[in-house]
Image (tube, coloured by chain):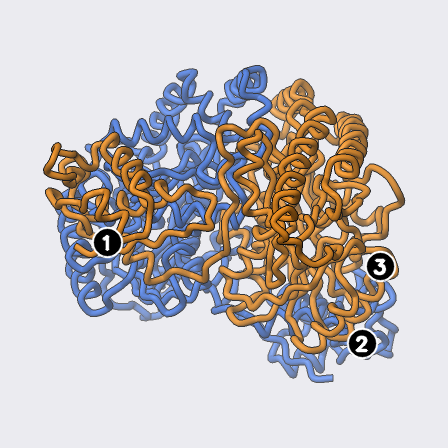
Chain colours: A blue, B orange
C-alpha cells in the first residue's frame, strides 16, 4: 500500500480533514481494500511530516464513520467494504483522467466560532419582505397565468417578465435596435451561457485582477487563457487595459464597472468611454457584469457601458439577486440578437428554461410597487452599512492599512501593510469570532498577500463596527509583533 | 454585394422566413449597408432558385419592419442603419468563428392551423393542482424557513428537500453507501452537469437511436462522438449494445430504460442486468435518465439500473417535471460522491444553486400528501390517454403502419410504411390541424423516414382520437396515391 495523499498546508481546510477526505475516498473506491492495515499514527505522521495528533484526529473520524476499526496494540484496519458494496469502478480514476484545469482555491468554510462574517456577498435576511413575496405568490397563482406558469416555457424566459425587462432596457437606452434579452438562472448563469456561446479552449479573456472567483473559475474550466487587468480605486487601470488589449488580442473582456467584486471600485465615465473605444477598435466583445449597479448608496451613477457603447460589442448581464433575494435565481442577458439566439440554444441544452414561478413572482413583486419600496429600504440600509464600515475601517485598522471607498455594492477591499498576510491571519480572526475572505481567493496573476475582502451587505452597523474593531485588534497586534522582532516590510501601496 | 444566404429547403421554417432572417442579420450587422440596393425579387429568386413570391414575401416583411424601403420602379434599399446604430462589430463573424458542431435540426415551430398537437412531451395543464401549489407556497413562505429560502444556498440544493430525496433513495435501495445527491434545474441540467464533469471533446458516448434531441445535441455541442444504439420495442437492442461496447470503448452510456423518448420502449429486467454486467466489465459509466419512470400506467415496473447495479458505475437522473409541473425546474442526480462533488463544482460555476422557492414548494407539496393525490390523478389520466392513443392507432393508421405499445410515459413511436416520409407529410397534417414530431428530429445515425413521435400526455382522449383519425386520413390518402402510381416500397419493418 502506497499512501501519498496530497495535502495543502496553506489551505483553510484543516490538515486532518484533508487527510480524512483522501483516505475515505480511497476506502470507498476500493484502493484501500477491506482488511488492509493502516500505518500507525506515528508512522504516518512521520511519513507525511505531520503532527501525530493530526493523523489521530483523522483516524478517529474514519472510525466514527465505521470506515476503519482499531485494535489496541494491533493498529487500524479498513472495514468499509462491508458497509459500502465493492465498487469495481474507480471513480477517482474515471474523473481524474478528465480533470479540467484546477480552478484555484475555493472559499474557505467558516469555523464554528465565527459570529460576524464578512465572508460572503449576500443581502441581509432581515430586510427580506417575506410577507410581500407571499402576496406576490398568491397573486400569480390566483391569476389567469397560473397554469402556464407551471407548464414548460421558452428558453428566452417567461414572456411577461421578458417583455417588462426589454421595455425597461429600451427606456433606459440600454437596448438597441436588433438587441434581444434572455432570462437566466441568475447572473452566474448569464456569464456561463455567454462563455459557452463564445469561448473555446485556448481563447484569451481579459478579467479584472482581483476578480470574483465565479468569473475566474468558470473561464478556467472552459479552457480560457486568463489575463488579469489590475484594479485600482478607480477600477481597471487604463494603461494596463490598453497594453493587454494590444498584446493579447483577447476574444472577450469581462468587466464589472460598478462596485466591482471584490474591490468595490467603480469605473469613471471617461474611463468607460476609453475602454469602449479601444475594445471596439480591437473587435473585442465586452461583457458588462452589472450585478451590483442598482446598489448605489451615494454619489452619481456613471452610465452603463451598454448605454454608451457605439460598437455594438457590449453584452449586459443583470440580476434581481443582490437587490432582492438571491434564493430566487433570476438574472438576464441583453445583447445583439445573433448572440442571444446562440445563448438560447445553450440555455435550452443546459436546463430548457429558467424556473417560471420565481420569474412570475418577481414580476408581480415589481408591478405591485413592492419592489420599489423594498429597493428604497435596501438602499437606506446599505448607506448605513457602508458608512459604518468606512468609519470603522478608518478608526480600527492599523496604521499602514489602506481600503477602498466604494459608493455602493456589498464589498470593500482592504490592504494590510507588509508583511501581514491576510490568509495567514484568517484563522486568528476567526478565533476572535470574525471572518473575511483573503485576497488570494480573488487572484488572477497578481499576488496581494495583504489583500482581503470585507462583505458588509449582510451585517448591521453594530455588527460591522464590532467586527472591524476585532479585526483591527488582530491585525494591529500582529503588526506590533512583527515590528517588535524587526520584521518590518516595505511601505504599503494602494491596491 | 454578394448575397449567398444558406437556405434549407427541408426545414420546417418557411423559405421566405429563412431568407428574411438572413437579410435582417446582414442589415443589422452592417454587412448590408444603409442605402444599399437589394436585387429585384425576380433577380434574387433566379439567383437562389426560389419562387419569386417567396422573395417578395421576405421583402414585405423587411419593409414592414422598416429595415428596407421600396421605390416603385427603382427597387428596394436598406434603411435600417438609421434605426439601428451602426454596428462595427460583426456578430455573425464573431460567433461563426466559434460555431460548435451543428446540433441537428431543431424542433419545428407549429403552424397556426394546428389544433391538436402531438408534438411536445408535456403534461396536461388541466391536471395541474394550482390551488394546492398556492397552498404550498403559502405554507413555505409562512414557515420559519421563509427567509432562508430567499437567501443564497448550497450548490447541492435546498437542505430539507435534499434530505428527503436521499432518504427516499435509500428506502428504495437506490442510494449506496458513499452515494450523494445534488438537486438540479430539471433533468436536462442533471445531464448537462454530468457531461461537463465527465465528457471531453472526442470522448465516445453511446446513446439510444432514436433519442431525445436534448441528449444528442447537448453531447454533440460538448464535442462527444456519438454512437447510436438501435432501439426496438424492448428498448436498446442487446447485441448492438454489446458490439458497440467492445468496438467503441465508450466513456459513457446514456440510457432511458423506462418509457424512452421518443419510442416509449422499456428495457426488460433481464436486459437491464445484461447491460449492467457488460458495462461494468467494460468500465463504462451508465447514466440512467429516469425522467418518465414514475409514469407507469399498467404492467409491472422493472427495477432501476441504479438499484440492481453491482459495479457502482450507474448515475441516476430523476425529476419532478413530468409527474408534477415542468415550469418548476427541479430534478436531481444520484451517484458516487466523487462524481457528485465534481458535479457540485460545475453546479456552482453554472448557476450557484437551484432556485429555492420551487424546491421548497415541491417539498411541501410532497409532505402535505397533495403530491401523492396528484400523482394518482396523473396516472389515472395517463392510463386513459394511453388506452385512447393505442386504440386510435390500431383503428385509424393505414395498413402497414406499426407502433410501439408503451405501458407508461408520454410518447409512442409510429413507423409509417415505405415510401411514406413523416417529415414530408407534416405540413399536410398541420393543414388538417394536427401536429407531431417527425423521426428525423431524434436520429443519431439511423435514418427512419417513416418514423414519428406521438406525444399524448397533454391531450385528452377525445382529442387523441380526433387527432389520430386525422393523421390516419392524411397518411392513408398519401399511401393510396403512391400505390396508385405504382410507387409501392418494400415491406415495413418494426422500429
Tell whether label 1 touches label 3 (CB within 8 Å): no
Point out the tag, 3 or 1, that comes first from the N-terminus: 1
Is A246 situated left or right of B337 in this image? Answer: left
Tell whether label 1 touches label 2 (CB within 8 Å): no
Residue A425: quarter of image: bottom left
**How far is the residue under mark 3 from the one under mark 2?**
23 Å
- Residue matched to label 3: B308
Chain under disc 3: B
Which residue appears at 25% of the width and 32% of the height? B65
**How far is the residue under mark 2 from the one under mark 1?**
68 Å
Residue B381: quarter of image: top right
Chain under disc 2: A
Residue A73 is situated, as x and y percent measured from the top left of the image, at 86, 78
**Label annotation for residue A33:** 2
Is A265 situated left or right of A363 in this image? Answer: left
Residues B173 and B14: in front is: B14
Query: Which quadrant is home to the N terminus of chain A?
Result: bottom right
Residues B480 and A58: in front is: B480
Which residue appears at 14% of the width and 39% of the height? B75
Crowd band around label 3 with a 10 angstrom C-alpha radius: few (<14), some (14–19), many (20+): some
**Label annotation for residue B3:** 1
Q: Is residue A225 above or below residue A156?
A: below
Residue B332 is situated, as x and y percent measured from the top left of the image, at 66, 47
Tell me, yes or no, whether dots 2 and 1 are on the same chain. no
Amino acid at each position: 500500500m502506497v499512501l501519498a495523499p496530497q495535502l495543502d498546508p496553506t489551505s483553510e481546510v484543516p490538515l486532518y480533514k484533508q487527510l480524512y477526505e483522501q483516505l475515505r475516498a480511497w476506502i470507498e473506491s476500493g484502493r484501500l481494500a477491506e482488511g488492509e492495515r493502516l500505518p500507525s499514527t506515528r508512522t504516518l505522521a512521520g511519513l507525511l511530516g505531520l503532527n501525530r495528533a493530526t493523523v489521530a484526529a483523522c483516524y478517529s473520524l474514519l472510525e466514527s464513520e465505521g470506515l476503519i476499526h482499531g485494535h489496541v496494540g494491533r493498529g487500524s484496519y479498513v472495514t468499509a467494504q462491508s458497509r459500502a458494496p465493492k465498487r469495481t469502478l474507480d471513480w477517482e480514476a474515471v474523473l481524474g483522467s478528465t480533470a479540467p484545469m484546477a480552478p484555484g482555491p475555493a472559499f474557505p468554510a467558516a469555523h464554528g466560532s465565527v459570529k460576524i462574517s464578512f465572508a460572503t456577498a449576500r443581502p441581509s435576511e432581515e430586510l427580506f419582505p417575506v410577507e410581500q413575496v407571499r402576496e406576490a405568490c398568491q397573486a400569480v397563482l390566483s391569476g389567469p397565468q397560473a397554469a402556464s406558469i407551471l407548464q414548460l416555457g421558452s428558453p428566452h424566459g417567461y414572456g411577461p417578465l421578458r417583455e417588462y425587462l426589454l421595455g425597461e432596457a429600451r427606456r433606459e437606452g440600454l437596448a438597441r435596435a436588433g438587441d434581444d434579452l434572455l432570462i437566466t438562472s441568475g447572473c452566474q448563469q448569464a456569464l456561463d451561457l455567454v462563455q459557452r456561446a463564445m469561448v473555446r479552449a485556448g481563447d484569451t479573456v481579459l478579467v479584472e485582477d482581483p476578480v470574483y472567483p465565479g468569473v475566474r473559475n468558470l473561464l478556467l474550466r472552459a479552457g480560457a487563457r486568463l489575463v488579469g487587468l489590475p484594479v485600482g480605486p478607480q477600477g481597471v487601470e487604463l494603461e494596463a487595459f490598453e497594453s493587454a488589449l494590444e498584446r493579447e488580442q483577447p476574444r472577450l473582456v469581462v468587466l464589472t464597472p460598478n462596485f466591482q467584486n471584490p474591490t468595490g471600485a467603480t469605473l469613471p465615465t471617461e474611463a468607460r468611454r476609453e475602454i469602449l473605444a479601444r475594445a471596439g477598435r480591437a473587435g473585442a466583445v465586452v461583457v458588462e457584469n452589472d450585478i451590483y449597479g442598482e446598489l448605489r448608496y451615494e454619489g452619481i451613477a456613471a452610465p452603463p457601458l451598454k448605454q454608451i457603447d457605439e460598437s455594438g460589442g457590449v453584452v449586459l448581464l443583470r440580476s434581481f439577486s443582490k437587490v432582492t433575494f438571491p434564493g430566487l435565481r433570476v438574472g438576464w442577458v441583453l445583447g445583439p440578437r445573433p448572440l442571444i439566439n446562440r445563448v438560447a440554444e445553450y440555455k435550452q441544452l443546459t436546463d430548457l428554461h429558467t424556473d417560471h414561478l420565481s420569474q412570475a413572482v418577481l414580476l408581480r413583486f415589481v408591478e405591485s410597487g413592492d419592489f420599489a419600496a423594498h429597493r428604497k429600504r435596501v438602499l437606506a440600509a446599505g448607506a448605513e452599512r457602508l458608512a459604518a464600515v468606512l468609519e470603522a475601517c478608518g478608526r480600527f485598522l492599523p496604521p499602514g492599512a489602506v481600503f477602498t471607498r466604494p459608493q455602493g455594492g456589498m464589498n470593500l477591499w482592504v490592504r494590510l501593510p507588509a508583511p501581514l498576510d491576510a490568509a495567514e491571519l484568517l484563522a486568528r480572526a476567526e478565533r476572535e469570532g470574525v471572518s473575511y475572505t483573503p485576497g488570494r481567493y480573488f487572484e488572477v496573476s497578481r499576488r496581494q498577500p495583504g489583500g482581503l475582502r470585507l462583505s458588509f451587505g449582510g451585517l448591521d452597523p453594530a455588527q460591522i463596527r464590532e467586527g472591524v474593531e476585532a479585526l483591527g485588534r488582530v491585525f494591529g497586534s500582529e503588526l506590533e509583533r512583527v515590528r517588535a522582532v524587526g520584521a518590518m516590510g516595505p511601505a504599503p501601496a494602494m491596491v
